[in-house]
Image (tube, grey):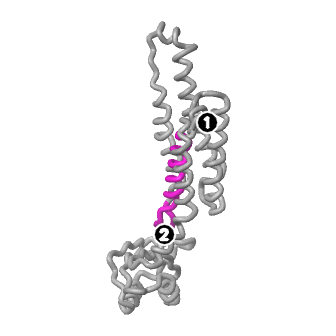
């Protein structure tokens, strides 16, 4: 505990340790995103975490300087500064960077939300590192890494066994949608809602695209359903979103 108390103080060793931890923790999280070919990867996460940590270190530096070296000048001009506002500006500013990672695919599926959330959480972790809150940093790093590395398998396991399913389908012609709907109803599938894009999709823009919101019968496999429906002559492309 005495060592932690020393490292929470503002000195050259604690500053070096905080910035090094920011590079390592941000980089480790970013490596996983890099392997998955996500918009933000190793260098992005590393720089976001490092920048947030450096911002908190800067705030502590200015607080110390205003309390010592710059104190006479501060009293002379009557200026007061709230150094905690630096961290708030990091949280606000990271939203613009996260927004750039979010996009909507041709299948009208939203991508990049996890990347944006990871960037935001990485910035918060960097603030904790910069403030010398090592216990919070460790817990935050483990939680973020667990969410990105392990929980996707749990999420995939649960979604594969869910009775609700969103299905993106490109049909050969809009007139064929009635037969396709009947094909699903013959399998006991309930259709909650339908979204139709009559302009078509894909490279050749031929044929409409439809998003079906379905409720599957018990023990219906998502993969098996996709495979069976893909053999329909009315289907040009099909995918779960």
**Which stretch is magenta?**
104-128
Q: Looking at this view, is 61 or 228 the one in front?
A: 61
The residues tagged by marks 2 and 1 sit, at their Cα atoms, a distance apart of 40 Å
As for residue 137 lying within the magenta part, the answer is no
Which residue is farthest top?
Answer: 76
SS at badge 2: helix
- Which residue sits at x=53%, y=46%? 97
Q: Looking at this view, is 209 or 40 the one in front?
A: 40
As for residue 108 lying within the magenta part, the answer is yes
- Marked residue nearer the N-terminal end (2 or 1): 1
- The numbered dot on residue 155 is 2
Question: Residue 220: x percent and y percent?
Answer: 43, 86
Question: Residue 241: x percent and y percent?
Answer: 47, 71
Q: Looking at this view, is 6 or 46 the one in front?
A: 6
Question: Residue 103: x percent and y percent?
Answer: 51, 58
Task: Tell me if residue 240 comes above or below residue 43 in the rendering.
Answer: below
Tell me if residue 178 can be seen: no
Tell me if residue 204 can be seen: yes
**Residue corresponding to mark 1:** 3
């Amino acid at each position: 505990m005495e060592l932690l108390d020393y490292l929470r103080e503002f000195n050259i060793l604690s500053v070096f340790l905080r910035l090094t931890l920011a590079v390592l923790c941000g980089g480790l999280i970013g490596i996983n995103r890099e392997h998955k070919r996500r918009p933000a990867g190793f260098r992005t996460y590393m720089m976001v975490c490092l920048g947030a940590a450096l911002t908190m270190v800067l705030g502590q530096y200015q607080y110390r300087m205003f309390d010592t070296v710059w104190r006479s000048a501060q009293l002379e001009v009557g200026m007061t500064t709230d150094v905690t506002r630096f961290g708030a500006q990091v949280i606000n500013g990271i939203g613009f960077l996260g927004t750039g990672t979010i996009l909507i695919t041709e299948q009208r599926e939203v991508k990049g939300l996890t990347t944006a959330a990871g960037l935001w959480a990485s910035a918060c972790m960097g603030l904790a590192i910069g403030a010398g809150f090592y216990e919070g940093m460790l817990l935050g790093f483990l939680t973020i890494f667990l969410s990105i590395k392990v929980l996707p398998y749990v999420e995939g396991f649960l979604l594969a066994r869910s009775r609700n399913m969103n299905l993106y389908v490109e049909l050969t012609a809009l007139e064929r949608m009635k037969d396709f709907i009947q094909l699903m109803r013959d399998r006991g599938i309930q259709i909650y809602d339908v979204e139709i894009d009559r302009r078509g999709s894909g490279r050749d823009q031929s044929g409409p695209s439809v998003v079906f919101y379905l409720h599957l019968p018990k023990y219906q496999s998502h993969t098996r359903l996709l495979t069976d429906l893909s053999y329909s002559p009315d289907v040009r492309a099909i995918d779960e979103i």
